[in-house]
């Protein structure tokens, strides 16, 4: 049947066109959804929250606006979180006077947080957040909502760095030296 | 190729799996009163033994506290002796009050970490298994989050 060929080939082209268009749309969608476009560049949502400290007193993160703020999401059940915290204690001690402020947001029980804070001599506020704190970290780039997750906010309230997993001392020192 | 630059996050998150893929939960009915629950733990990840919790609904199925297999002992500076599971954990859930043919929701809470140095908050997964009639063969393994096939396979 000679007249079937062109029809089949037209159908072939139609298929190819639809496939290419679909692939294009897929890539576009992936770009829109997966790209850090959804990740907040300014820390206003973070600076707007209020969480209780280990004594139950509400603390607004906005009180540290204007300082170089390092917000560390952690938990006592997260060994890699606990292991990096002495580094934060040291940085707070050495650079606090220059305008550096660490704040820990623990996804944990207040009693356990207090016990661990006492054990390592935590010298910065330990706030207690629940699942909402994890959701907040997601808007800052913690897409899989794991811990530790650290956000460095500059004096203007812009996010200077987000980091999932233990942060290296050299990386922390470099960004702090640049911002302070 | 340019289109793909920027997809994914910073270098720090080296292809970390979401918790339901790092710790894949599945269950199957062994007989009219027993369900086998299992976690398949991805390479490079581990689960905490004392954070595993199981529940079954409706409550009338009467899930007894399950016996967990021993884990690998690890000394933790803060918590002391902790046990962890890698590869696979299989737990038998005995439902003393279950009826043959009944549909049971099996819920598992787990918490674990990746060796690269991140931990996941407690995560809950669930499956619905249908208990076989007395004398019938075990039911199929039901995964909480079946792995999706890629476009090209």
Image (cartoon, rainbow, N blue to C red):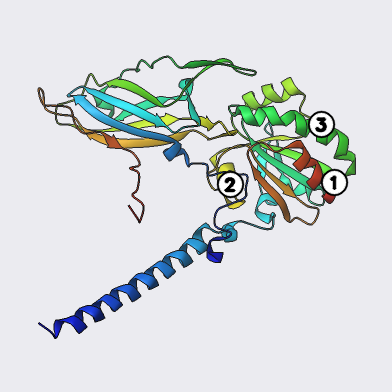
- Residue B54 located left or right of residue A55: left
From what the image shows, is residue B51 above or below residue A105? above
Q: Residue placed farthest to the right in the image?
A: A97
Indicate the secondary structure of the residue bearing disc 3.
helix
Q: Position of residue A101 (x, y in %)?
A: 80, 41
Q: Position of residue B61 (x, y in %)?
A: 24, 25
Q: Which residue corresponds to the image point at 76% horizontal and 41% vertical from the top-left?
A: A172
Q: Residue placed farthest to the bottom in the image?
A: A3
**Mark 2 or mark 1, whichever is nearer to me:** 1
Q: Residue A177's mark? A: 1
Task: Mark 1 or mark 3: name the one nearer the start of the chain.
Answer: 3
Q: B56 or B87, which lies in front? A: B87
Q: A20 or B9, which lies in front? A: A20
Indicate the secondary structure of the residue bearing disc 2.
loop
Q: Chain of mark 2?
A: A
Q: Quadrant of residue B127?
A: top left
Task: Mark 3 or mark 2: name the one nearer the start of the chain.
Answer: 3
- Residue B91 located left or right of residue A5: right
Can residue A55 be seen in this snapshot? no
According to the picture, the residue beneath numbered tag 2 turns out to be A142
According to the picture, the residue beneath numbered tag 3 turns out to be A90
Q: Which residue corresponds to the image point at 77% horizontal and 46% vertical from the top-left?
A: A69
Q: Residue placed farthest to the front in the image?
A: A2
Indicate the secondary structure of the residue bearing disc 1.
helix
Give me the C-alpha separation between circle 1 and circle 3.
14 Å
From what the image shows, is residue B22 above or below residue B30? below
Q: Chain of mark 3?
A: A
Q: Are the two marked residues, 1 and 3, in contact with CB atoms closer than 8 angstroms?
A: no
Q: Chain of mark 1?
A: A
Give me the C-alpha separation between circle 3 and circle 2.
25 Å
């Amino acid at each position: 049947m000679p007249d079937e060929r062109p029809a089949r080939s037209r159908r072939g082209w139609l298929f190819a066109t639809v496939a290419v268009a679909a692939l294009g749309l897929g890539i576009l969608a992936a770009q829109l959804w997966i790209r850090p476009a959804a990740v907040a560049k300014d820390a206003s949502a973070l600076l707007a929250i209020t969480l209780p400290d280990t004594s139950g007193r509400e603390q607004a993160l906005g009180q540290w606006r204007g300082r170089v703020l390092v917000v560390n999401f952690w938990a006592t059940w997260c060994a890699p979180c606990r292991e990096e915290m002495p580094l934060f204690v040291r940085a707070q001690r050495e650079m606090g006077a220059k305008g550096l402020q660490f704040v820990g947001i623990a996804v944990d029980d207040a009693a356990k947080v207090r016990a661990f804070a006492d054990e390592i001599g935590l010298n910065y506020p330990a706030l207690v957040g629940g699942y909402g704190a994890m959701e907040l970290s997601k808007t800052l780039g913690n897409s899989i909502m794991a811990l530790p997750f650290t956000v460095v906010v500059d004096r203007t309230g812009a996010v200077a760095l987000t980091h999932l997993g233990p942060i290296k001392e050299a990386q922390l020192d470099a960004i702090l030296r640049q911002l302070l | 190729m340019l289109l793909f630059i920027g997809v994914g996050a910073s270098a720090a998150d080296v292809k970390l799996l979401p918790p339901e893929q790092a710790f894949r939960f599945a269950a199957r009915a062994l007989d009219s009163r027993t369900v086998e629950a299992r976690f398949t733990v991805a390479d490079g990840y581990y689960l905490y033994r004392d954070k595993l919790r199981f529940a079954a609904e409706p409550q009338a199925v009467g899930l007894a506290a399950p016996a967990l297999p021993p884990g690998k002992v690890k000394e933790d500076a803060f918590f002391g002796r902790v046990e962890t599971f890698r590869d696979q954990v299989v737990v038998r859930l005995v439902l003393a009050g279950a009826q043959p043919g009944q549909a049971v929701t099996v819920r598992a809470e787990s918490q674990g970490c990746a060796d690269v140095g991140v931990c996941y908050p407690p995560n809950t997964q669930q499956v619905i298994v249908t208990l076989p009639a007395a004398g019938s063969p075990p039911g199929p393994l039901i995964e909480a989050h079946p792995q999706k096939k890629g476009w090209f396979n």
